[in-house]
Amino acid sequence: MNFSSKLIEDSVNAFASLPGIGKKTALRLTLHLLSMPPEISEGLCEPVLKMRKEIQFCATCNNISDTVVCSICSNTARDQSVICVVESIRDIMAIENTNQYRGLFHVLGGVISPIEGVGPGDLNIESLMDRVKAGTSKEIIMAISPTIDGDTTIFYLSKQLEAFDVKVTTLARGISFGGELEYADELTLGRSIAARRLYEE
Amino acid sequence: MQLKALTLTNFKNYESQTLEFSTKVNGLVGKNGTGKTNLLDAIYYLCMCKSYFGMPDSAIARHEQDFFRSEGHFYKEEEEFKVVAKVRLRKKKELECNDVPYSKLSEHIGLLPVVVIAPDDTRLATEGSEHRRRFANEILSQLDREYLKHLIHYNKVLAQRNAALKKMAAEGRHDDALLEVYETQLLPGAIYIYEKRQQLMQDFLPIFTKTYAAISEEREVVTCAYKSALHNKSMEQLFAESRTKDKFLQRTTTGIHRDDLVFSVNEKPVRRFASQGQLKSFILALKLAQFELFRQEKGSSPILLLDDIFDKLDESRVEQLIQLLSKDTFGQVFITDAHKHRLAELLAQANLDHKMFLVDDGKVEILD
């Protein structure tokens, strides 16, 4: 694309560096901002800058936070004896949206995959062990994707946790809501049959 | 199992080509480098989701094209299977059966059993153990879907364990707990694959020795034995014992990825002691035994692809082979040859129902 202005070009390139935004959309956004009063652009940049400068990662669970300790960790109404281990912050949001969980979280920051250059030392595993060592935890929930690398990570963590008096659980795997049985893959269906439950439950 | 029609788009040197085949023998003749083998590979691709000749997808797409497509109409008794492979470079490859896409390619393997005999096959005996493991894997994955699943899983975990060993060596910090985790994950697959390979050799050996006797004029004793570290020790024990060595060499030195098949003639290794003639008969017998095993296990004849057999086999063996083909145990066969008349004459002599195709630089015409 040819631009008559270097300023426009820089703005387009900046937008286009974001995920899901191509050159054309970037140009559309830029021209839209140009057609609006300057305050609109300021209103857009300011919260982004503030967010980037002031956001912190919770000292306890690595969740995003406005304070040293995040709102979940500092909420005394939550069950302090359960820690749900997740790969990323997005998983916390997904689980929080279910309104089904009242315990704490711990963000690993990925899964073990030496091919991708991620070993156990590159994840927030030590801080998890420190939390468990403190002794208030009774249960650790592994909410990690059921992939090969996810399984490796769960396995590794459960080995590390063997030394402590905590229950290690994983998410149930089975048929999704609204899903039809005939379309479920064999592995999922097989697991669902093996781990079936009493109807009253 | 028969392939009635094949349509290729941008597959190697074929820009656009539709062919209708005989359900018995199909002879593909033409000069070298005109695309005879590519047709066989296109058929193999529809059965196994990859090239027999180890060609990457990017090399299969016709020059300067970014996709290729192969569509085959297969028949098993009266049932039709329309199989389409659509490959866009740098995208996930897609395979459909009767217009339903597979979510995993491994679900397709074994539906259309296929056996290839090609000039390069002598490396089964003369080169490294990976060729012999590939041979065993090719057979077992077409017979047993669980085998293929275990193999894929095993190889993925193995790659991670090897990467972990390299990373640990680079960082100078060894984490035995992580290695142990990978070993535990490798274990079920290793045991399953070991047992299946052992079972395979039990079923395969009698068929193989019978086939060899049928095609060889001499009376030597041939065997094909399964060699694995798991014969004497458990997988757990092997992993535990080789961990120090693994750390030093930065790769996993024990497991079913180190298995081998030992081929021998009169109790001597084929690689060093067999004559050229014995070697050729040996390889041919291995492949025909694979064919027979599939026929017995699947209840119908697999498709047989014979690539340039005149190149490596002498005339008497080719004649024997053609004789064998006239038996009703064989189903559909595809044969390539550079000499137009030699193949046609042989097929006519053997009184085989056949159709001949002349291949010329990516174009095919039917010969009368």
Image: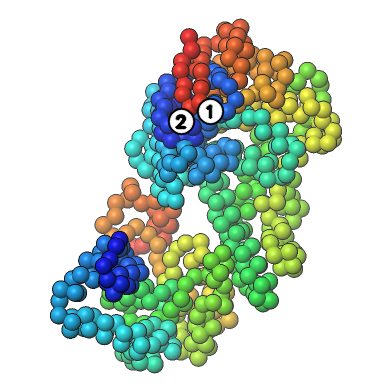
Query: Residue extending furthest front?
Result: A4
Helix, strand or loop for disc 2: strand
- Asked if residue A149 is positioned above or below residue B232 in the image, the reply reads below
In which quarter of the view is residue B164 placed?
bottom right
Amino acid residing under circle 1: Gly
Residue B354 lies left or right of residue B323; in this view the side is left
Q: Residue at x 74, y 67 (%)?
A: B248
- Asked if residue A196 is positioned above or below residue B12 in the image, the reply reads below
Q: Earlier in the sequence, mark 2 or mark 1?
A: 2
The x, y position of residue B232, in whole percent, is 76, 53
- Asked if residue B59 is positioned above or below residue B365 in the image, the reply reads below
In which quarter of the view is residue A101 placed?
bottom left
Helix, strand or loop for disc 1: loop
What is the crowding at mark 2: few (fewer than 14 residues within 10 Å), some, or many (at least 20)? many
Q: Which residue is drawn at 44% across and 51% down?
A: B90
Q: Residue B336 carries which label?
A: none
In which quarter of the view is residue B307 placed?
top right
Residue A104 lies left or right of residue A151; in this view the side is left
Do callouts 2 and 1 mark residues in contact (Cβ within 8 Å)?
yes
The x, y position of residue B73, in whole percent, is 40, 28
Residues B188 and B111: in front is B111
Q: Which chain carries label 2?
A: B
Q: Name the residue under label 1.
A: B35
Q: Mark 2 points at which residue?
A: B14
